[in-house]
Image (cartoon, helix red, strand yellow):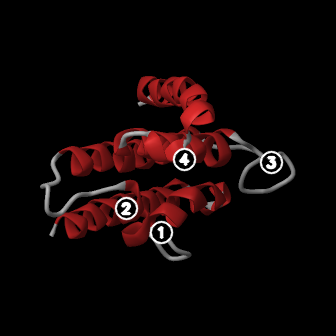
Amino acid sequence: MRTRMKEILQTEDDLAEIVQLVGKDSLAESDKLCLEIAKIIKDDFLAQNGFSSYDKMCPFYKSVGMMRNIILFYTLGIKAIENASAEKKVTMNVIKDAMGGSTGVIYKISSMKFLEPSAGEEVNMAAMNKLSEEIHASYRNLND
């Protein structure tokens, strides 16, 4: 998982130059997804706030659960984009429309960092597993 996150961040770095030259609209849909996931990794997974109770210390199980859900969302997104039929094309806009918003899966992935470590491993892992199931269900619904 860690290697996959590094690859996503490296790809995002490579794509940044292209985006500056020709714009984000000219990228392939898989590249747009990569940019979105890289943003989540940088803004929500790697950035920490030492003054907050939920973020000053992140237990290993929480880090692994967050990485697992981020990579799951990315992997299923790539599969959905690549396996889409011509008449039912899956784009980043389709994914955002289906899974965005203040109650959508993308928001929930970004909000994983707010899980309180003091609640305990069992409670936090149950929330992570529930989100994992929601990610799977969202992509199943997208393909239907």
Q: Position of residue 122 (x, y in %)?
A: 47, 58
Amino acid under disc 4: Lys
Residue 95 numbered mark, or none: 2
Amino acid under disc 3: Asn
User: Nearer the N terminus, badge 4 or badge 3?
Assistant: 3
CB under 8 Å between discs 2 and 1: yes
Q: Label 2 vs label 1: CA separation?
A: 8 Å
Amino acid under disc 2: Ile
- Residue at image position (54%, 65%) is 107
**Given this view, does label 1 or label 4 mark the residue nearer the observer?**
1
Callout 1: SS: loop
8 up-or-down from 87: above or below = above
Query: Quadrant location of residue 141?
Result: bottom left
User: Nearer the N terminus, badge 4 or badge 2?
Assistant: 4
**Given this view, does label 2 or label 3 mark the residue nearer the observer?**
2
The 10 Å Cα crowd at callout 4, few under 14, some 14 to 19, many 20 or more, is many
The residue beneath circle 4 is: 62
Q: Label 1 vs label 3: CA separation?
A: 25 Å
The residue beneath circle 3 is: 49
6 up-or-down from 82: above or below = above
Depth order, front residue of 43/51 = 43
The residue beneath circle 1 is: 100
